[in-house]
């Protein structure tokens, strides 16, 4: 689907000029020549002893036929007055959202679907293929597109889920078979016998281990019980419940606040922390947390980095956090502090971002992305405002991307964040989008496990 859309990005691929309209006229051979060639059982291939005897022909190719997609009735019904390049972006956003719903990206409930949800998903898939892809890129005559547009609802109602036909798990199980085959003598039918014996041996070992575990649970005098006897594994006072506290690392780099203020954008650090410039800090390149997803998915461990050297390159993550007033805010991790003045104090210094109005009919905004910009305390400030965020108030990592259309309009089509100077004017003009398409959580392939 993606390859078809990229190949037909200029318009529907099925629009062609009439057949042979650009063919150059050819002159017929004289009848006498043909009869002579037939009589002599010779065929004139255009070559003589002195070389090729070909005459130059005047071949005039017509101008390429470019379909006028924008003025079509179907285009105007779907996109209105939206320019073609923004309509293409809109279709890609719709494709990403549809793929995310099929994969269960960023959803709380991924193992069950109501019948209404199945009907809505099937209708969205059919509209995407029949309407949006067709008007911009031409009809997709593939079995996958046909099944997605016309048979998704039947598959959902029959199976009740979207992972019934997933073959990746079974294909992954081929790995042990291939390793067994590599250790065999690779000689005909004996390979099957060797693999069957290996499977039986493995099954017997697992059966014996389960038997030992059952004897241990029943208070039996098993070998494993003797090995573990005397250890604290049987201590009933040990709390085996999961804890939400991550072990903190005391590794870091010691510096003063004055040294930290020499880093770009941290000139107001002493005022933010309320400490003198001589006060010492211990900073770390990253910290880990149990994140909180607003869509209700189970928490996972995420790592927030704020370092100039992560695998040889700078890495500063965007994150959501709760400010002092209890509001959910977006920031850019600039400095991770673990100790201040010799006292343990875990917090992260972030550059603040704020949501700004989006452009009219923006496909990214319609999809759920938020358009954001750096927040400045005063219009003439050179650097964005800073905030001190305790690690316990950090919610999760966010994926933020630059708004490349805005960047190209200011700096040209060859402009990238890497080749654009980080000046005060540029920081005031920069715009970003949160990436709602990024799959932080997805549907598991085998929900029963």
Image: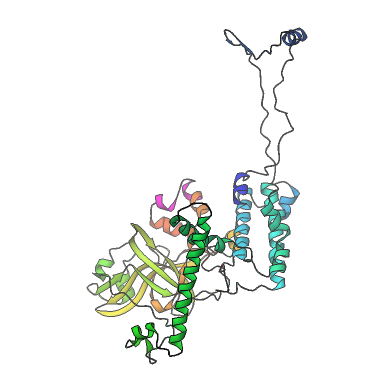
Residue 252 point in image, percent of width and height: 27, 70
Residue 190 point in image, percent of width and height: 51, 56
- Above or below residue 280? Residue 22 is above
Look at 57% across and 72% down and name the residue there: 447
Q: Residue furthest bottom?
A: 237
Q: Nearer the viewer, residue 447 or 251?
A: 447
Q: Is residue 290 left or right of residue 3?
A: left
- Is any part of residue 232 visible from this angle? yes
The magenta stretch spans residue 416: yes
Look at 50% across and 68% down and name the residue there: 200
The number of discs equals 0
Locate residue 123: give its quadrant: bottom right
Look at 60% across and 74% down and name the residue there: 109
Q: Residue furthest left?
A: 278
Q: Is residue 304 left or right of residue 174?
A: left
Quadrant for the C terminus in the image: bottom right
In magenta, the rendered stretch is 409-419
Q: Nearer the viewer, residue 93 or 145?
A: 145
Q: Nearer the viewer, residue 378 or 279?
A: 279
- Is any part of residue 385 visible from this angle? no
- Above or below residue 19? Residue 214 is below
The magenta stretch spans residue 350: no
Residue 69 point in image, percent of width and height: 69, 45
The scheme the figure's colours follow is rainbow
Residue 422 point in image, percent of width and height: 38, 55
Look at 56% across and 63% down and name the residue there: 170
Q: Is residue 410 left or right of residue 308?
A: right
């Amino acid at each position: 689907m993606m390859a078809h859309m990229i190949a037909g990005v200029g318009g529907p691929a099925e629009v062609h000029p009439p057949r042979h309209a650009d063919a150059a006229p050819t002159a017929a051979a004289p009848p006498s020549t043909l009869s002579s060639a037939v009589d002599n059982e010779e065929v004139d291939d255009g070559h003589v002893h002195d070389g090729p005897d070909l005459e130059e022909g005047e071949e005039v190719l017509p101008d390429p036929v470019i379909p006028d997609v924008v003025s079509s009735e179907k285009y105007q019904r779907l996109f209105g007055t939206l320019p073609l390049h923004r309509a293409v972006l809109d279709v890609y956003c719709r494709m990403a959202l549809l793929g995310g719903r099929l994969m269960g990206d960023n959803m709380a409930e991924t193992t069950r679907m109501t019948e209404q949800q199945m009907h809505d998903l099937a209708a969205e898939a059919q509209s995407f293929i029949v309407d949006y892809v067709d008007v911009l890129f031409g009809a997709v005559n593939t079995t996958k597109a046909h099944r997605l547009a016309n048979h998704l609802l039947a598959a959902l109602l029959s199976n009740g889920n979207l992972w019934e036909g997933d073959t990746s798990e079974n294909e992954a199980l081929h790995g042990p078979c291939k390793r067994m085959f590599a250790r065999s003598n690779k000689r005909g039918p004996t390979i099957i016998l060797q693999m069957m014996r290996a499977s039986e041996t493995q099954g017997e070992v697992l059966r014996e281990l389960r038997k030992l575990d059952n004897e241990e649970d029943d208070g039996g005098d098993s070998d494993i019980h003797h090995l573990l006897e005397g250890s604290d594994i049987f201590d009933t006072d040990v709390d085996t419940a999961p804890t939400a506290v991550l072990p903190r690392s005391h590794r870091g780099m010691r510096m003063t606040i004055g040294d930290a203020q020499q880093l770009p954008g941290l000139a107001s650090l002493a005022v933010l922390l309320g400490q003198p410039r001589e006060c010492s800090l211990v900073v770390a390149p990253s910290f880990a947390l149990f994140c909180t997803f607003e869509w209700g998915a189970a928490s996972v461990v995420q790592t927030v980095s704020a370092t100039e050297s992560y695998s040889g390159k700078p890495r500063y993550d965007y994150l959501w956090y709760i400010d002092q007033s209890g509001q959910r805010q977006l920031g850019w991790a600039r400095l991770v502090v673990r100790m201040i003045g010799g006292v343990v104090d875990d917090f992260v210094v972030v550059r603040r971002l704020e949501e700004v109005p989006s452009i009219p009919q923006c496909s990214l905004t319609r999809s759920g992305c938020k358009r954001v910009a750096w927040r400045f305390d005063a219009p003439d400030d050179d650097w964005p405002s800073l905030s001190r965020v305790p690690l316990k108030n950090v919610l999760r990592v966010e994926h933020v991307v630059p708004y490349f259309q805005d960047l190209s309009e200011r700096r040209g089509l060859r402009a990238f964040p890497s080749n654009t100077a980080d000046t005060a004017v540029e920081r005031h003009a920069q715009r970003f989008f949160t990436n709602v398409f990024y799959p932080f959580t997805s549907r598991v392939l085998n929900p029963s496990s």
